Image (tube, helix red, strand yellow):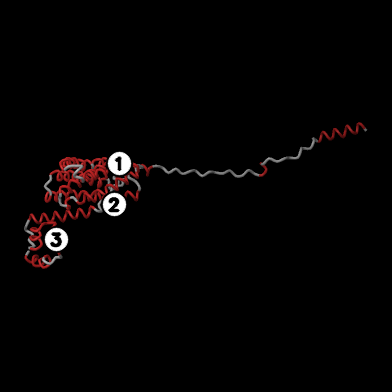
Amino acid sequence: MDVLRNTLQPITHNLPAPIRDLGVSLIGESCYKTLLLDVDLTDEACLKLAISKGLGIGIVAASSIVKVPQILKLTSSRSADGVSFLSYLLETAAYLIGLAYNFRNGFPFSTYGETALILVQNVVISVLVLQYSGKKGLAAAFVALLAGAAGALFTDNVLDMKTLGYLQAGAGTLGVASKVPQILAIWSEGGTGQLSAFTVFNYLVGSLTRIFTTLQEVDDKLILYGFIAGFALNAVLAAQMIFYWNSPSSAAASKKKQPRVIAAPVKREAAAPFAASPRLLPPAPPPQGHHQEARLSHFRLV
C-alpha cells in the first residue's frame, strides 16, 4: 500500500485545478483528500461514494447512446414490428415526471442524468413507431402533449412539490408498468421483432447499477423501489431476448410463409394461315351437263 501511495501522490498532488475542482464537486472535500491526496483506500464510506459517482457518470455517458441501436433498427427496417408504443408511452411519462422530481429536489445530476437523455430518445422512438404504424397525426399530438406536460411539471407556480411527490409515486408504478406491454408483445408475437438487444441488456445493467447509486447517494424510497421493480422486469425482458434470440416474430414468419404468386406465361396462338382469311372466289362454272343439253337443243332446232 505504501508503494502505491508513494507512486500516486506525486500525481494526485499536482492535478490541474479544473480536475481537482471536478473531483471535489463529485465526492466532496473530505473524501477527495482521503482518496486522492492521502491515497487512503481503507475509508469504506468514501470508497463507496467514489464508486457510486463513477458508476453514475458511466450510466449518464452510456445513456446518450443506449437507444440509438433501437432507433437505427426502426429506421432501417421501416417497421415497428415487435415494439410496443404503449410501453414507450408509459416509460416516457414516468421519465418526464422523474426528471422533474429529481431536478426540483436538487439531487446530484449523476444520480438521474440519464433520465433526460433517455427521455429524448424515447420520444424519437415513439414518433417512429407511430409513423411506421400509419399514425402520423397521432405522433404530432403526442409531441405537443408531452411539451405541455413538461412545462407544467417544471414550473413551481403550476405544480407544487407535494403534488409532484404524489406524481413521482405514480411514476414508479408507470415505469414498472411500461415493461409489461413490451413483455406481452414479445410473448404474443413469439419473437422480439425489431427490439434491440443492446438496449434491453443495457437497461438491465443500468437498473441494477442505479439501485447501488440510489442506496449510496439518495435517501428516497420512492426512487429506490422504482429501480428495484424496474430491474426485475428488465430481467424478464432480457430472458425473453435470450429465449427468442433466433425466432422471428409471427408477423415476419407469416410474411415468409406466404407463397409467391407467379403469373403463368400467356400463350399466344400462331397467326392464322393466309388461306383462312376470307377471299372472293370466282363463280363456279355451270355444270357440264347443262352445256351439253344446250348444244343438243340447238342441233334439234337446226
**Which residue extends farthest front?**
157
Splitting the image into 4 quarters, where does residue 291 fall?
top right
Name the residue carrying label 3.
Answer: 21
Give the label on residue 189, or none: 1
Q: Is residue 186 found left or right of 109 in the rendered image?
A: right
Q: Secondary structure at mark 2?
A: helix
**Residue under the image location 67 percent in, 43 percent down:** 275
Q: Nearer the viewer, residue 299 or 16?
A: 16
Q: Position of residue 4 (x, y in %)?
A: 9, 65
- Identify which residue is drawn at 16% across, 62% down: 19
What amino acid type is highlighted by mark number 1? Glu
Q: Element under label 1?
A: helix
* Amino acid at circle 3: Asp
Callout 2, which amino acid? Answer: Pro
Instruction: Tell me how far mark 1 sits from mark 3, CA to CA.
Output: 52 Å
Q: CA distance from mark 1 to mark 2?
A: 21 Å
Residue 233 in the image: state x and y as whole percent: 20, 43
The quadrant of the rendering that contains the N terminus is bottom left
Percent coordinates x, y for residue 290 in the rendering: 82, 33
Q: Is residue 271 left or right of residue 83?
A: right
Sequence-first disc among 2 and 3 = 3
Q: Position of residue 23 (x, y in %)?
A: 13, 59
